[in-house]
């Protein structure tokens, strides 16, 4: 459709499209009016390749939904364009973002008014770095930092006659972000890689997993562009740009002044030699211009054009910087050698082994066959440094910060879920009591303590609604750990009366044995007989033929003894009898007498074919009414 045909179209029943704000390889962005909240928002309509298989289309839509939800965790950060909602329209994902009136992206500002002063560039870099590091602490990578994704509002987005100071800096387009610990392999499409070649980290162009260091390289390239007026690897074609990115050093900047060493440090081709976020924060703070007013936090629930400024007495809008900036090593006074100026733009070229790999990648670019290069392997498992403070205090006892997917054993001193449990991280196959399913970054410790439980309840609601006898639990950092940089509330799912008997939700894998305790409504299973009345249920893809599918749970009456098989069946017929027919039958499933006696008296009702050996057809689905 053309822009004119789409104007005034209402999507998701509430967002009226007004005009297109821009378009690119990842889709197009619209200005829209939210008819429910009576405000303007920006809608990103994600583009998906034409002709991809239906199952891949579904996977990409699901991934977009998950990524937008993770991006929304940064909604309270003053330098992140807020993600407000995500929905599907005509089979395609849309992301609802904050709209900032009058905002212009950095690329547009530089194109219209030329390079920015070094001090103003440092100030923009400081704000963007603050946003990136907040995301990194929450386990979220941006992966596409570039001038077009940095929005400037107020006096930082000057009109021709306005070159004043101050203004708002927002990092946008977290919609293609990815959690390092999600375990998901991200593949490129046949038309190119995720990211912009001129601002892409060299290791990512070689197919290495993205990391926080990759985001820092992209920030360095973006700041180079802001202060010089052109990118460090700008060339006439994408092929030449990638060649320069991999093999050449950028031209030494002529306008950067004292900002030059920071750019050189961030643009180191070897991520191990690249300047880290804390050091860059110190150095940018020394160079940034300091406004007079203290910062004001933006409300996360609605768009606003309010100016966010940095405190005059602190280098970061969100957190103080501890310690002195690192110093460069050099010859001592008595070494007998005069100090030699170090050229910041010279670094070691890649080894012959790496160069060979680069050549292969470049050939792949020319041939248009980037598909299949995995940009992420899920191996980045860094945890926050907590100093000597335990991340959740002495009572909990953990020595490292939890991350999504971690399983734990829990010992409660008194009544379950009253107070804090003693936790131990364990293998998820060792009958864990609970599992971390999500993390939430808070703006303050008081906010985490006050709202953490409600936030975790909301984040885990989809999983808890499909299981039985489970509950969410919010684990907030201790005060000492918060002061040392641990800012994430861990959202765990626990069994109320017994252990989970394995991982839950998306952390389960097809082919693994599943128990009633960690099953989900809608799960599909094949079975293997172990002994009389005892079968191993293995999770399978519902798009394949399968023996059983979970309809829901029925709680057994008080006093019912374990092993009442006929009564179990009658309970399922009474609850889900409408699913029983000549081509479908009902089955009852319970786990073990031990858990039954401990209080887990739930029967899972399964849908199956009536004849032994027959399987349900692919795509069997359980209506939502079955979950009532």
Image: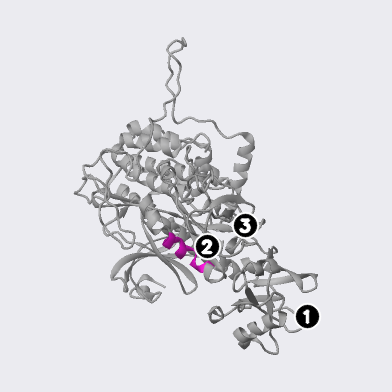
- List the residue tagged with mark 3: 432
Q: Is residue 108 magenta?
A: no
Q: Residue at x 46, y 61 (%)?
A: 456
Q: Residues within 10 Å of mark 2 (few under 14, many from 20)?
A: some
Q: Quadrant of residue 591?
A: bottom right
**Left or right of 317 on screen, residue 53:** right
- List the residue tagged with mark 1: 612
* Disc assigned to residue 63: 2
Residue 225 lies, in percent from the top left, at 37, 43
User: As displayed, is residue 596 above or below residue 243?
Assistant: below
Instruction: Name the front one of labels 1 and 3.
Output: 3
Q: Residue furthest bottom?
A: 582
Q: Residue at x 25, y 39 (%)?
A: 312
Q: Quadrant of residue 2?
A: bottom left
- Tell which circle, 2 or 3, labels the residue nearer the N-terminal end: 2
Magenta segment's dominant SS is helix
Please report the bounds of the magenta region as a residue range: 453-463
User: As displayed, is residue 546 above or below residue 216?
Assistant: below
User: As displayed, is residue 194 above or below residue 94?
Assistant: above
């Amino acid at each position: 459709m053309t822009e004119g045909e789409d104007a005034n179209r209402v999507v998701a029943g509430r967002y009226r499209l007004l005009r297109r704000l821009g378009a690119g390889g990842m889709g197009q962005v619209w200005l829209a009016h939210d008819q429910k909240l009576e405000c303007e928002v920006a809608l990103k309509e994600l583009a998906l390749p034409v002709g991809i298989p239906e199952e891949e289309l579904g996977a990409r839509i699901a991934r977009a939904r998950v990524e937008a939800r993770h991006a929304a965790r940064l909604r309270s950060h003053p330098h992140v364009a807020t993600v407000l909602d995500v929905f599907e329209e005509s089979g395609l994902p849309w992301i609802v973002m904050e709209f900032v009136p009058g905002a212009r992206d950095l690329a547009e500002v530089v194109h219209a008014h030329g390079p920015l002063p070094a001090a103003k560039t440092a100030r923009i870099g400081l704000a963007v770095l603050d946003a990136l590091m907040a995301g990194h602490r929450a386990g979220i990578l941006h992966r596409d930092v570039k001038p077009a994704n940095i929005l400037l509002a107020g006096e930082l987005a000057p009109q021709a006659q306005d070159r004043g100071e101050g203004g708002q800096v927002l990092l946008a387009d977290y919609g293609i972000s990815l959690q390092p610990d999600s375990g998901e392999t991200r593949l490129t499409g046949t038309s190119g890689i995720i990211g912009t070649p001129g601002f892409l980290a060299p290791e990512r162009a070689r197919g290495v997993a993205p990391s926080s260091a990759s985001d820092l390289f992209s920030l360095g390239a973006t700041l180079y562009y802001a202060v010089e007026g052109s990118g460090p690897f700008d060339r006439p074609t994408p092929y030449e740009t990638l060649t320069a990115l991999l093999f050449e050093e950028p031209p030494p900047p002529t306008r950067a002044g004292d900002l030059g060493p920071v750019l050189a440090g961030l643009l180191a081709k070897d991520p191990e030699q690249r300047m880290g976020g804390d050091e860059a924060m110190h150095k940018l703070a020394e160079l940034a211009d300091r406004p007079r007013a203290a910062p004001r936090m933006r409300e996360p629930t609605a768009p606003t054009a309010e100016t966010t400024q940095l405190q005059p007495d602190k280098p970061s809008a969100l957190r103080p910087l501890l310690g002195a900036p690192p110093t460069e090593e050099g010859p001592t006074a008595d070494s007998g050698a005069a100090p030699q100026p170090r050229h910041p733009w010279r670094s070691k070229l890649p080894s012959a082994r790496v160069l060979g790999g680069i050549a292969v990648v470049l050939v792949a670019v020319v041939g248009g066959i980037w598909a299949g290069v995995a940009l992420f392997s899920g191996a980045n498992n860094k945890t926050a440094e907590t100093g000597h403070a335990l991340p959740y205090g002495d009572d909990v006892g953990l020595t490292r910060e939890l991350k999504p997917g971690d399983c734990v054993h829990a010992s409660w001193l008194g009544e379950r879920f009253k107070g804090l449990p003693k936790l131990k991280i364990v293998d998820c196959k060792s009958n864990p009591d609970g599992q971390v399913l999500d993390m939430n970054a808070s703006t303050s410790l008081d906010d985490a303590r006050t709202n953490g439980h409600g936030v975790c309840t909301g984040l885990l609601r989809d999983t808890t609604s499909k299981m039985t006898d489970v509950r969410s639990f919010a684990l907030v950092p201790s005060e000492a750990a918060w002061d040392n940089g641990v800012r994430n509330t861990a959202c765990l799912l626990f069994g109320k009366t017994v252990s989970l008997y394995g991982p839950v939700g998306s952390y389960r894998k097809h082919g693994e044995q599943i128990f009633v305790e960690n099953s989900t409504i809608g799960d599909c299973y094949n079975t293997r007989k172990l002994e009389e009345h005892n079968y191993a249920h293995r999770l399978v893809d519902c798009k394949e033929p399968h023996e059983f599918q979970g309809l829901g749970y029925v709680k057994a009456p008080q006093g019912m003894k374990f092993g009442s098989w006929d009564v179990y069946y009658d309970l399922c017929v009474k609850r889900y009898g409408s699913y029983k027919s000549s081509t479908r039958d009902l089955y009852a499933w319970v786990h073990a007498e031990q858990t039954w006696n401990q209080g887990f008296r739930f029967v899972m009702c399964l849908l199956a074919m009536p004849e032994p050996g027959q399987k349900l057809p692919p795509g069997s689905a359980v209506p939502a009414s079955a979950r009532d």
